[in-house]
Image: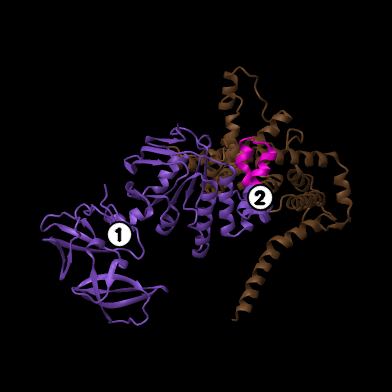
Chain colours: A purple, B brown
Amino acid sequence: MAEVRLKQVRKAYGATVAVHGVDLDIRDGEFVVFLGPSGCGKSTTLRMVAGLEEITTGTVEIGGRDVTRLEPKDRNIAMVFQNYALYPHKTIYENLAFGLRMRRMDKAEIDRRVRSASVMLGLDPYLERKPKQLSGGQMQRVALGRALVRDPDVFLLDEPLSNLDAKLRVRMREEIARLHQEVGTSMIYVTHDQVEAMTLANRILIMRDGHVQQVGAPLEVYDRPANLFVAGFIGSPEMNLVEGHVSGRTVRCGDLQVGLPPDVEAGEGSAVVLGIRPEHVGVAESPGARPFQVSVIEQLGAQTLCIGEVDGVRLRVLMDRSDAISHGTTLPVQFRPDRLHVFLKETGARLNRAGAREGQRPAA
Amino acid sequence: MSSKATIYSFLFLGLAVTALLIVAPVVYAVSLSFYQMDSFVGAPRWVGLDNYARMLSQWIFWRALINGFIYAFGTIIFQVVLGIGFALVLNQVFPGRNIVRGLSILPYLLPTVVVVLTFKWMVDGSIGVLTQVIAALGLPPVQWFESPGAAMASVILVSVWMWTPFVTTTFLAALQTVPSSLYEAAKVDGTNAVQRFFHITLPMLKPILTVIVLLRAVWMFNKFDVIWLLTQGGPVGATEHLAILSYKQAFGQFDIGGGAAVATISFAILSVAVFIYFRLFPLDTE
């Protein structure tokens, strides 16, 4: 086990810069998820930690040791690949043992580790099979097992669940979380799936176009998205983002007028973007409630998602399950200023000082 | 026409073409081996297995068989080893890679007679570039086509020169299908480049290697043009293998039955070898 430190890690392919200087300290045993859309540089950053991509500038330290110029085999890392990368001509046992054999480990110790990992991952019945005789989930478990037997300083997982179907993905997500709890080794996990990030991570690093957008605990990035991109990227259903102008202590978005959160300072007439999570739109009769006309209803089971318009502004509203709503229904909605996010339209920077959660203290 | 009728009509056409172009000539050639004939116009005389007994009792047959194995094994080993080596080099990223890849296939595109004549000029006793190089190095001159060992080396060398590009291209194509993540996983697992070749590349190339060795073996065992153009089987039979012997017997000695018997034995040896090969190296190894 070890801490991992990235200092201004940058990757350039000729004139094209893929990763613009990442700084990150990962604590011993921490689970950090690199999250972002395709092409944002998250996998490249992970591969630089692994030693599979050369680092253009900057340094990577693992366990206090500068590994920037070391080969992958000398970094004491283990990696799980998106397509499993199991050796198709070797049995599952040989796949699990290969990394240890290459390190000239004692045969009895190899056997002990392989048996132990296969029990932990439920792979015992498949040890003599070849990878193509296994299902996707089993192959992914072998890939995890191959990393596990190595007892590395850090686990690197590159979109390990992307090739699995939705149901299996949920199950494997739980297994990875359990595995992390059991082994307690630092893990870096790359995904574009925010649900995986939110459920697995101790901290999430969100990237876009090679730039780090925000690093924080899952609820922290949910409650206090650092900018417009993070606000739109984190949360499902997606946050409502409505353009408007500051007028006194309100934001005018067309005919809709919403009170500014108390912790937002913005100049008169500033162009801003209002962020309202669908679950933070209040649906109740109250003074000042506005009529929301429903045009699309999505029943999610426990909740109902309505899409419609209020004062000419299109919104998504998430509420407890309601069977009575139909197309054309008008609902009274209101916006609590302390649950609104305000971003400067020009830069996308967040203007709130506090989070959008009730009773949250302003950020230091 | 119903779909079944369409299927049968295609099947029939396929079978008819196969029968006409493959089965009939084979049957005719095999049938010739049971007759005594000194030309294709005279009346053949049935001799049963006499031609086989006669050819098998001659030492030139056994010499041709051994020469055939030496030539086939020699060319296959060099073609496969060099082919994999070149493919690994051409699979690397370097400036001008596409041009070099294109150039590497050139020898395969040349007609055999051009390659053979080029080689003959290269080893010409007075103006040959190889002769000059050998002389410049202070080495004794090589009797390329006069000494038995050098003649066999010449036919192997020219065959390797000409057909290695085919092997290279095939392996290069196969290398593109090996997922890069396997190499990356092996790097993380602690392998060096040599270990990656033996643990990843070679096993992943095994299916294609199986087919290539088989194809090259069949082709080289039957190869006629290179040897005929270079040495005509000489000197004193040193490069004469079964295909050359069969031709010489049929059209040089006017012993068509004997030539057909040699060709039939060669065909039978190859058939048995292919059968054993597939038993030893089944294509579907999983």
Magenta stretch: includes residue A182: no
Which residue is drawn at the image coordinates 73% and 30% (left, top)?
A: B148
Q: Secondary structure at mark 2?
A: loop
Q: Is residue A98 above or below residue B286?
A: above
The amino acid pointed to by label 1 is Arg
Are the residues at dot 1 and dot 2 in contact (C-beta closer than 8 Å)? no
The quarter holding residue B81 reads: top right
Q: Is residue B221 left or right of residue A295?
A: right
Please provide percent x and percent y for residue A205: 37, 49
What range is drawn magenta here? A93-114
Quickly name the residue at label 1.
A357
Task: Characterize the magenta stretch by its predominant secondary structure.
Answer: helix
Please provide percent x and percent y for residue B69: 75, 41
Chain letter of mark 1 equals A
Quickly name the residue at label 2.
A91
Magenta stretch: includes residue A95: yes
Please provide percent x and percent y for residue A293: 25, 78
> How many numbered circles does the render carry?
2
The amino acid pointed to by label 2 is Thr
